[in-house]
Image (cartoon, rainbow, N blue to C red):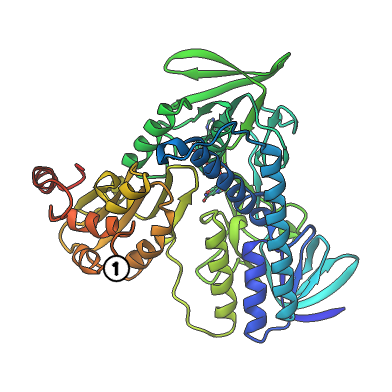
Amino acid sequence: MGSYDIAVIGGGPGGYVAAIRAAQLGFRTVLFEADRVGGLCLNWGCIPSKALLRNADVLTLVRNASAWGIRVDGVEADYGAAVDRSRKVVDQIVSGVEGLLRDNGVDVVSARARIAAPGVVEGGGERFEARWIVVATGGTPRQLPGVEVDGDVVITSREALARRNVPERAVIIGAGPIGVEFAHLWSTYGADVTLVELLDTVLPQEDPDVSRALRRSFEARGIRCLTSARVGAVERSPSGARVTVEHAGARTTLDADTVLVAVGFVANTAGLGLEELGVATDRGFIAIDDAMATNVPGVLAIGDVTGKLMLAHVAMQQGVAAVERLAGRSVPPLDYVQMPRATFCQPQVGSVGYTEPAARAAGFEVRTGRFPFTALGKAIAVGETEGFVKVVADAETKQVLGIHVIGHDVVDLLGEASLAVLLEVTTEELGFAVRVHPTLPEAVKEAALAVDGEAIHIARRRAQRAAATGGGSA
Ligand code: NAD
């Protein structure tokens, strides 16, 4: 029986980062992973999808080359080659993570593990002792009752990332990040795409101004967006599937060769021995406190399995915070409102902090400022003027409560946006800090100034109107 300080179950972004940090802190650490390290994110999520989305960018650029005075004839897009590239990217990063684990002295056991008793993990037919056990087993696409995923016509993101062909006609159920990213990717490669979303907008977790702008952009490209729409049935048909949707008081049928179900994730908690141990759950997710501890002493949980905010970077931060606390470091509790969120369609969508309605609901008196990329030198120079930056601030203290971006390649702006929200900067500070000219971050500065109608590169009438109405008119 091996004896460790920390046993981590699950080698996704939460688990492998927790294991590496634990080893750095001097803990003897073992990591159990049934598949390849990297988890869903690296193998079948964030990373391969970003590789494919990059292909969509390149294809769009080449198709529009004539706008730059560059003649390109006979453009042919080989989607299979894009998928092959995405798998190579995955392999490279997985072997990088394997190397990091080795380099840090983390023992990796390639087996499914379960907790046999407090302080005891079983995996690969062996028992391991560990003072602390960190459950980082992630999540799996949620199934829709009555809609059978057959992996052929009705698929999840897992199959969508593996297949080497683009659907001709796709219905995507759910307009969250996964639905929206595939809508953009497949539509760029020529598919006829319909998004079906239960709530009244696409990307419903985002600020309504941003969701509206994305919808307009998608519809202008021919992506249909049925919102406030409920899927009744998905039946197999000669051409693939027939999807019945209740929408605007009527029943519509949509024919498709591919139906992508992207309606969220559920936690991977089965087979871990959690019930026997008495680990408490909340709506299927493992319940944790600020130290990522469960109700059972010595058992912690991080990442998607906790359902706090199902994003890889959140899992990583939970993993680091959990083991640093075990090492006796003082770590502030994680504030999930302050975690940046990004969707990598084009235009990209990103946010950190409160949306405007969420800030009002939390009791703030709100002022907003907006700055459009049509007014930004860098955006005009590179020919990508769609979208805007929106700053949500407390009217009284001027503290920045939220920053929302939509536009071409804008999610990198979330770096400074996260810092601004974390450090509780004011709109005056955000507007005072100097950005390089010409760059996209100038839009953040201008949006902060626009909260008080003081943005430089917006016509005066527009700025005055913004100030009079509490911003947001750009
Ligand atoms: P999600 O929960 O973010 O979105 C699912 C969407 O489906 C929601 O808008 C929901 O209202 C809708 N929905 C639910 N039931 C429905 C129904 N019956 N009919 C129609 N619509 C329905 O989940 P997701 O997009 O599947 O992503 C899964 C997880 O992975 C999420 O936690 C997400 O944040 C994460 N993820 C993040 C990124 C990113 O950050 N870029 C990308 C992919 C996935």
Q: Position of residue 329 (x, y in %)?
A: 52, 84
SS label for mark 1: loop
Quick check: 39 above or below 327? above
Q: Nearer the viewer, residue 372 or 377?
A: 377
**Residue occupying the point 48% across, 82% down:** 330
Q: Position of residue 443 (x, y in %)?
A: 28, 55
Q: Is residue 9 visible?
A: yes
**Residue occupying the point 78% across, 69% down:** 117
Quick check: 374 above or below 16? above
Q: Is residue 56 left or right of residue 297?
A: left
**Residue occupying the point 71% across, 27% down:** 153
Q: Classify the position of the C terminus by image quarter.
A: top left
Q: Residues within 10 Å of mark 1 (few under 14, many from 20)?
A: some
How many discs appear?
1
For mark 1, what is the residue?
424
Q: Position of residue 192 (x, y in %)?
A: 56, 24
Q: Classify the position of the N terminus by image quarter.
A: bottom right
Q: Nearer the viewer, residue 379 or 306?
A: 379
Q: Is residue 356 left or right of residue 347?
A: left
